[in-house]
Image (spheres, rainbow, N blue to C red):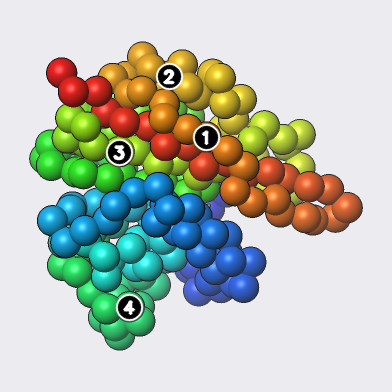
Amino acid sequence: MTTEFNREKAISWDSPLKVEISSKFVSEMKKNINFGKSLKVMDFGCGTGLVGLNIAPLVKSVVFIDTSKAMLEVLQHKAENKQKPSASYKIIHGSIDRYTSKDIDVLFTLMALHHIEDTQATIERFASIIKPGGVLVIGDLNEEDGLFHGTESVPHNGFYIPQLAQELENSDFDVVKTYTFNTIKRDHKEYEQFILFAKKRLK
Ligand SMILES: C[S@@+](CC[C@H](N)C(=O)[O-])C[C@H]1O[C@@H](n2cnc3c(N)ncnc32)[C@H](O)[C@@H]1O
């Protein structure tokens, strides 16, 4: 069974665990990136906006993009009800191909990349919309045994960082740093989550 981000999943997405993980991810980004009111950022695979809505007060504008209509409906509701002070924002339903402007200063993505079959192609698309010198931040699972998603199957059971780094290097990014930012404990097992910062090369 593949993961479906349907309405049932969307309305219960913002659990204490998800809020905690996204808060840790946001906090690591804030330590490493000077967010400011001149920046345009993208939350790719944004889901209900747990990451992007927390960055919104710090930047000029946020592009939220996700293939799940149900997750985006929850995000829209939260944004309209001003759960966070807002920058200007745009919500796009679809995959990364739906965005073609080459004007993103920082693109971040939390727990979405392992749902995507062709990560190299997606990273190349990221490279095409991030400005030279701009930053890509990936938060995802380290390689795991496939039990994280239970009976659901996903294209990647986490990532082997050197291989992901190679895909980034192949696509005009230099990896700046990566480290474990969180460990999820479940059923007597531990799943590590990494954060990776990469810089788009100045051509
Ligand atoms: C595990 S959720 C993470 C959501 C959010 N980033 C968070 O941390 O709460 C993965 C999200 O990626 C989205 N997604 C999966 N494939 C995608 C694609 N090809 N393009 C954009 N979003 C995608 C799903 O719809 C889902 O909302």
User: Seen from this angle, which residue lies furthest right?
Assistant: 188
- Within 10 Å of disc 2 (Cα), the crowding (few <14, some 14-19, many 20+) is some
Element type at marker 4? loop
Q: CA distance from mark 3 to mark 4?
A: 23 Å
Between disc 4 and disc 2, whose residue precedes? 4
- Residue 178, disc: 1
Is residue 152 something one can see in this rendering? no
Three-letter amino acid code of the residue under disc 1: Thr
Pick the front one: 39 or 164: 39
Three-letter amino acid code of the residue under disc 4: Lys
Question: What's the residue at 31%, 31% (across, down)?
Answer: 199
Question: What's the residue at 39%, 72% (across, down)?
Answer: 74
What residue does disc 2 label? Answer: 167
- Within 10 Å of disc 4 (Cα), the crowding (few <14, some 14-19, many 20+) is some
Q: CA distance from mark 4 to mark 1?
A: 28 Å
What residue does disc 4 label? Answer: 84
How many callouts does the rendering have? 4
Between disc 3 and disc 1, whose residue precedes? 3
Three-letter amino acid code of the residue under disc 2: Glu
| Residue 174 placement (x, y as % from top left) | 36, 23
| Residue 100 placement (x, y as % from top left) | 14, 38
- Within 10 Å of disc 3 (Cα), the crowding (few <14, some 14-19, many 20+) is many
